[in-house]
Amino acid sequence: MAIVAGVDFGTLSVRVSIVDSERGRLGSAVEEYPLHRKREDPDFATQAHEDHMRALASATRKAVAAAALKGEQVEAIALDTTGSSVIPVDAQMQPLNEYYLWCDHRAKKEAQEITKLAHAEGLEAIEWCGGVYSHEWGFAKLLHWLRNNEEKRGQFASAFEHCDMVAATLCDITDPKKVKRSVCAMGHKWMWNPKWDGLPPQEFLSKLDPLLDGVREKLNGEYSTSDAIAGHLSAHWAEQLGLREGIPVPVGAFDAHWDALGAGCREGDVVNVVGTSTCIIAMAKKAELVPGVCGVVPGSVHPQYTGIEAGLSATGDIFEAIARRAGVKVSELAKGLENYRAGQTGLLRLSWDNGDRTVLVNPELGGVTLGWNLIHTAQDELFAAIEGTAFHTRIILERMAEHGVRVDRVINGGGIPQNNPVLNQVYANVLGKPVLVPSGVPTSLGSGIFAMVAAGVFKTVEEAQDALCLDHTTIEPDPKQAAVYEQLYPLYRRVYFALGSRSAEPVALGDVLPEIRRIAAEVQGS
Ligand SMILES: Nc1ncnc2c1ncn2[C@@H]1O[C@H](COP(=O)(O)OP(=O)(O)O)[C@@H](O)[C@H]1O
Ligand SMILES: O=C(CO)[C@@H](O)[C@@H](O)COP(=O)(O)O
């Protein structure tokens, strides 16, 4: 028997779970931290390193108390975070600014420049990240920071993903060169891959902007999968967290990737980690390039597999915005959704409110709702938004399957499937497949799995999964509702490509809207 701590840094809060190798999760605690946004600049989204560390210390102490244990008993701590959440640091690992959070979109211009040059130079890496370098990713954010912080540039020693920065802080590693970097974070967001000798060549980066001269060297170091140890908990942070000094901290990774493992992901499974955004995660022994899918990286989800990541740039964030505009909480607006039937609203809602991450990969897109009439309500829009995210998910899963990714089982992981059963049923109906939902919050179990491996309790991720993962409830598609979606999905697909991409066949709303309305009228009349 062994006890470890699993940590998950989400967009708004950190969850710490205390996990026992035999009894599973013994207790957990959540602590929030501020997300700094600016009303005048919707692209701005930052968070402070100190706020994260303070929240981590408090949540860890509370989780240990909730588990009715002593912190001394915890044998390892592992952590995952959002990404690309990037922090520039000086030569002593001190932050030069706040994190550019994953949803900070200020670096659109830089991302476009990277994409353009990468294609012009024939950089193989650009094909493996969907053909478009995202403004949510590391190099775009770093270049934006360098261009906009002239007075601090002289102190710039390196930049880190949130997961690597927290592990380094906990282990008191103060030399940027000695910090181990996560292949998951660096592979999906910084074009790192052993296939082309790590990061893109320095010549490419310098051509992009001379401000990036020498940056490859500054980002160098040991790149590791999460079965490697990043370091050991320092005396200072052991005291802050209420744990034992010297326990191992494995190399971290992204939240969605470990959430997928925590939700029980094996080869052949696709996990929709549905939260503020959706990350769609799969893993394969061998994976080919998937056009429009934002990352195919060896070792990223599971150390011995190639991880595949796709997703929606906003899911819960869309639901929340709809509720906010109606002046209520999303949990309030969600009450009564179970009375809705497939397609009944007559609304078709595209989930582009935060741009499109996969498969169009276009940050310029914005949310679109077709079919409004004068009596539609905010709740109608919420239901249509759930349907819209499910349709978008189907487009992505079809793209993955076309390129050899197995979609034998679909698992709805992440926070929202635990709170919103209607969403799970809509997903099963739209996908026309059973959807498996973990029978309890899967968040932070992935970290528990890697903490167990770090503590040496289990030799493999699979053994740890067998011990820690929760059972699944299977949501079967409802044949009648699924049949309605079989009519609506082709319309959604046409509109998605026609509105979102210049190269697709155009579509006339005068053709689409009567069809959506006809389907709604049939549903209402049945
Ligand atoms: N009942 C609900 N139905 C749908 N969405 C919800 C509900 N309750 C909360 N949400 C959304 O869940 C999101 C948070 O998801 P969660 O998985 O807990 O966090 P994170 O994505 O940061 O890890 C928020 O965007 C919130 O709007
Ligand atoms: O993009 C990634 C991981 O690659 C996520 O960290 C990001 O979408 C944030 O995820 P959450 O929805 O906050 O869990």
Image (spheres, helix red, strand yellow):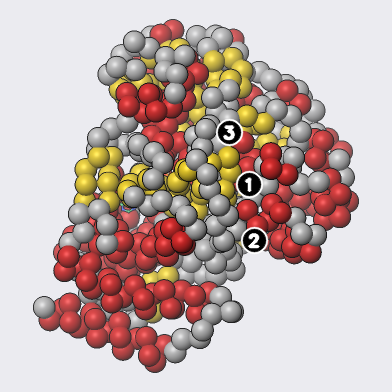
Assign a secondary structure to mark 2: loop
Three-letter amino acid code of the residue under disc 3: Cys
In which quadrant will I find the N terminus?
top left
Q: Position of residue 18 (x, y in %)?
A: 37, 21
Q: Position of residue 152 (x, y in %)?
A: 82, 41
Q: How much space separates mark 3 and mark 2, taking CA atoms?
A: 24 Å
Assign a secondary structure to mark 1: helix
Taking the image as shown, residue 310 lies to the left or right of residue 232, namely left
- Residue most extreme to the left: 526
* Residue 516 visible in the shown view: yes
Q: Which residue is mark 1?
A: 189
Graded by Cα atoms within 10 Å as few (under 14), some (14 to 19) or many (20 or more), the crowding at tag 3 reads: many
User: Is the residue at mark 2 in contact range of ligand 2, meaning its CB lies under 8 Å from it?
Assistant: no
Q: Which residue is mark 2?
A: 132
What residue sits 76% from the left and 59% below the top?
122
User: Is the residue at mark 1 in contact range of ligand 2, meaning its CB lies under 8 Å from it?
Assistant: yes
Up/down of 276 relative to 362, above or below: above
What residue sits 66% from the left and 27% below the top?
180
Which badge, 3 or 2, comes first in the chain's sequence? 2
In which quadrant will I find the C terminus?
bottom left
Decide which of 166, 296 is in the foreground and name it.
296
Graded by Cα atoms within 10 Å as few (under 14), some (14 to 19) or many (20 or more), the crowding at tag 2 reads: many
Graded by Cα atoms within 10 Å as few (under 14), some (14 to 19) or many (20 or more), the crowding at tag 1 reads: many
Q: Which residue is mark 3?
A: 163
Taking the image as shown, residue 287 lies to the left or right of residue 133, namely left
What residue sits 32% from the left and 69% below the top?
384
Taking the image as shown, residue 31 lies to the left or right of residue 252, namely left
Up/down of 131 relative to 272, above or below: below
- Residue most extreme to the bottom: 510
